């Protein structure tokens, strides 16, 4: 049985402009000690999905199940969730400067979390544990730095302090919500290496939220690609990188800068993600998809198994055998599109090709 099993999770927010469908029927599982990467553009529902597990989406209308270690998190009381947050499921947020309280010393914030969940620990014991945690995450002179305020730490050190806080109660699951976005490339690599090492040492499951597939390549085992609040594709890391099926996944991979292709233009995905209040009919990706067909405009594809891999699933109307980056796979896509595209879909494809981003891209 998975440590966490999420089934048909839906989250929406009523607003004056309409209902925001932030998460639309997402299902996934993660085993103890596993690392799952959740990838997608801003607004795809990644953060809302994981924050809902901990009851942090106030005002949201939530349905579905999220069974963690035998307990359904959806619908739990505030007090019951409070016992799970931090102690069994920890979160590392994107910006540690806003996550750490500016008026309290870093050491106090770590020890306060320890004692809030384990009242048998004395203040002195909690402080010793905090020193050991700061040392474990690579902060020099941890006993001295324990008495510093967050603004006295660099960005990388603040994130290390947040990781120390997340590890303080030895949780079974850590959710890292874009933990390296605000850091430079060198510090980013150090933080990822630290997360991976600590996760392996402790056997903790890790959900890594990011919009950077390069980060996923370094740390994840399984990958879920999200678009417009739903799962676009889910597979092992190897399958996502070498046998992508969904055009959105393929577009994300093709937009990654490569040092070996320094003189080539980037190949962006045209257009913008859709409004989650007014989603387009059919496949939500069709206004940006270079493989758009007639049925994409009216029918939303279900998550289907990709041929040759039972754990690889994709929500796209292209043939399930049209996976990968080979010439054969691309030819199969082109043949399918030629047979399935007429008037309306052809007009959408023409509009995509004429967009400014299309020059030098996968469309041209």
Image (spheres, rainbow, N blue to C red):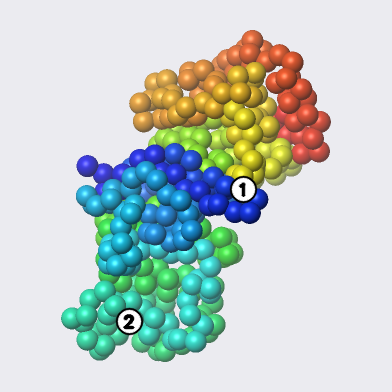
Q: Secondary structure at mark 2?
A: helix
Q: Which residue is mark 2?
A: 111
| Crowdedness near tag 2: few (<14), some (14–19) or many (≥20) residues, C-alpha within 10 Å | many
Vertical placement of 127 versus 318: above or below? below
The residue at the point 23 percent across, 76 percent down is: 118
Place of residue 97 in the rendered image (x, y in percent of width and height, measured from the top left)? 53, 74
Q: Which mark is residue 172?
A: none
Place of residue 192 in the rendered image (x, y in percent of width and height, measured from the top left)? 45, 59
Q: Is residue 144 left or right of residue 101?
A: left
Vertical placement of 168 versus 342: above or below? below
Q: Is residue 316 visible?
A: no
Place of residue 122 in the rendered image (x, y in percent of width and height, measured from the top left)? 22, 86
Q: Quadrant of the C terminus?
A: top right
Q: Is residue 171 left or right of residue 46?
A: left
Q: Which mark is residue 18?
A: 1
Place of residue 68 in the rendered image (x, y in percent of width and height, measured from the top left)? 28, 51
Tag count in the figure? 2
Q: Is residue 312 visible?
A: yes
Q: Nearer the viewer, mark 2 or mark 1?
A: 1
Vertical placement of 288 versus 147: above or below? above
Q: Quadrant of the N terminus?
A: top left
Out of 80 and 269, give the one closest to the viewer: 80
Q: Secondary structure at mark 1?
A: strand
């Amino acid at each position: 049985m998975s440590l966490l099993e999420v089934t048909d999770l839906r989250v929406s927010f009523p607003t004056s402009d309409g209902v925001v469908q932030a998460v639309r029927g997402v299902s996934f599982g993660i085993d103890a000690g596993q690392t799952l990467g959740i990838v997608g553009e801003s607004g795809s529902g990644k953060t809302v999905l994981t924050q809902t597990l901990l009851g942090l989406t106030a005002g949201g209308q939530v349905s579905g199940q999220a069974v963690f270690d035998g307990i359904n998190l959806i619908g739990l009381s505030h007090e019951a969730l409070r016992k799970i947050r931090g102690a069994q499921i920890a979160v590392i947020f994107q910006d540690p400067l806003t996550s750490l309280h500016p008026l309290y010393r870093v050491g106090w914030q770590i020890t306060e979390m320890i004692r809030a969940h384990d009242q048998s620990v004395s203040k002195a014991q909690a402080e010793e544990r905090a020193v050991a945690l700061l040392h474990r995450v690579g902060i020099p002179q941890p006993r001295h730095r324990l008495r510093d305020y967050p603004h006295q730490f660099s960005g990388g050190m603040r994130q290390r302090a947040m990781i120390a806080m997340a590890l303080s109660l030895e949780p079974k699951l850590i959710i890292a919500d874009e933990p390296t976005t605000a850091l430079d490339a060198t510090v980013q690599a150090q933080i990822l290496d630290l997360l991976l090492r600590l996760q392996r040492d402790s056997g903790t499951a890790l959900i890594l939220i990011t919009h950077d597939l390069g980060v996923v390549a370094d740390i994840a085992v399984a990958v879920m690609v999200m678009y417009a609040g739903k799962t676009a594709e889910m597979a092992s890391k190897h399958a996502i990188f070498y046998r992508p099926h969904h055009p959105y996944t393929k577009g994300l991979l093709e937009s990654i800068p490569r040092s070996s292709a320094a003189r080539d233009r980037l190949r962006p995905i045209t257009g913008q993600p859709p409004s989650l209040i007014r989603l387009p009919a059919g496949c939500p990706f069709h206004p940006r998809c270079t493989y758009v067909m007639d049925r994409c405009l009216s029918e939303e594809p279900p998550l289907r198994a990709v041929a040759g891999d039972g754990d690889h699933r994709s929500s796209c109307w292209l043939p399930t055998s049209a996976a990968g980056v080979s010439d054969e796979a691309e030819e199969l896509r082109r043949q399918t599109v030629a047979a399935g595209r007429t008037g309306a879909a052809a007009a959408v494809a023409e509009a995509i090709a004429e967009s400014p981003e299309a020059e030098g891209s996968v469309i041209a």
